[in-house]
Image (spheres, rainbow, N blue to C red):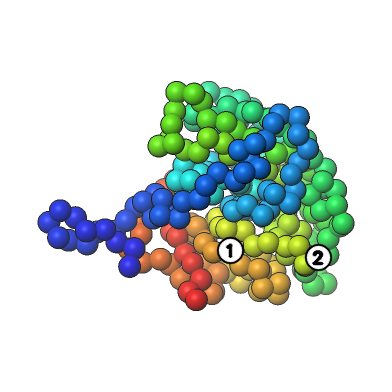
Amino acid sequence: MASVTSTDGREDEMTLREYMQGQREDLPVWLDQFEDGAIFPLQEFFQSRVVYYPGSGTDGHPVKVFGSTHSAHCFVYADSGVTQPALEAKLGHPLHGFQGYHTLSRLQLRETDLVPQGWTSHLHAGEVPQGSDGFGAIAAAPFGFLEILERNWEFDDNHGPRRLAILFLGADGIATYDALFCQKPTGIPPFAVLLQDHGFGGNYNRFGQDGLLEQIAIRCGVFPIFLLVAENTRAWGQFERIPDVESDIGGMHAMPRFLYHRPK
C-alpha cells in the first residue's frame, strides 16, 4: 500500500510527490554530459525514462510531478494547436517558464531526425482524420525542437535535477505516440503518459479510455508504467488507480490528476 504512518499511528495518504520520490533515478549519462552544439541523441533520449504528454499546450505539471522528484528527466510535449513562438515566449518568461531553470541548448529538429527510417501508422482506414499529414497531422505549423534545461546555480537537488530534456512538437498527439513509441523493433514504451481530454480542445479524438490513443497502445502492446489522469478523463482499461496516493492539481483548469498503473 502506498501510505505513510503518522506520529499518532494513523496511516495517511501519500502525496503524489512523495510517491514519485520513491521512483527516483540517476540523471542519464548522456544528459549529464550533453554539450551545447551537440546533435540530437535520438537513441539515448528514447532509451531514457520518457514522460509523454499529448495535447500538452504549455502545461508544466508533468515536469513538476516527475522532474522535480527525479523520477524522470526526459519529456515529450505534443500539441498541434501550439506554435513554436508561443512556446519560446513561455520558456523565456521569468514567471511562466520552468522555475529555477534556464536554457542550456535548443536543437531545432525535423521529422527525419525523430524517425530517420520513417514510420508506419497503426490507425485503420477511416480512423485517420481528414487533412492529416502524417506525424504532424493537422498541425497548423508543424515544428520540433529539443530544449535542454539546466538548473540555476542557487538551487540544489531538492528543487529538481541538474538537467532536464524536453522535446516539444507541433504535432498530433495520437500520431506522435504511434511514431515515437510503437515502431518495431525499436519502439520503447514511455515511462508515463499524462491524459486529459478537453471537450472543446480541438483534438479530433479522445486520449482517454476507448479513444484512438488507447487503441494504438493495445494494437501495438505498448503501454507506459504510469498514467497521470485528469479527473474529467477515463483511464485506459488495463490501468488501475494506485491506492492511497493523493491527487495533484495541474493544467490550465487546475484539475485534480490521479496516478494509475498496470497491475502485473
Residue 15 at x, y percent in the picture: 34, 52
Residue nearer the viewer, 191 or 212: 191
* Observer able to see residue 236: yes
**Crowd rating for badge 1 (residues with CA inside 10 Å; few <14, some 14–19, many 20+):** some
The image quarter containing residue 141 is top right
Q: Which residue is mark 1?
A: 224
In the rendered structure, the answer to whether residue 158 lies left or right of residue 205 reads left
Disc nearest the viewer among 2 and 1: 1
Q: Which residue is mark 2?
A: 121
Residue 207 at x, y percent in the picture: 61, 61
Residue nearer the viewer, 11 or 93: 11
Q: CA distance from mark 2 to mark 1?
A: 19 Å
Residue 187 at x, y percent in the picture: 72, 62
* Image mark for residue 61: none
At label 1, the amino acid type is: Pro
Q: Where 56 falls versus 214 (above or below)?
A: above
**Crowd rating for badge 2 (residues with CA inside 10 Å; few <14, some 14–19, many 20+):** some
The quadrant of the picture occupied by the N terminus is: bottom left
> At 53% across and 23% down in the image, what residue appears?
94
In the rendered structure, the answer to whether residue 168 lies left or right of residue 143 reads left
Residue nearer the viewer, 113 or 176: 113
Mark 2 vs mark 1: which is more N-terminal? 2
> At 61% across and 38% down in the image, what residue appears?
32
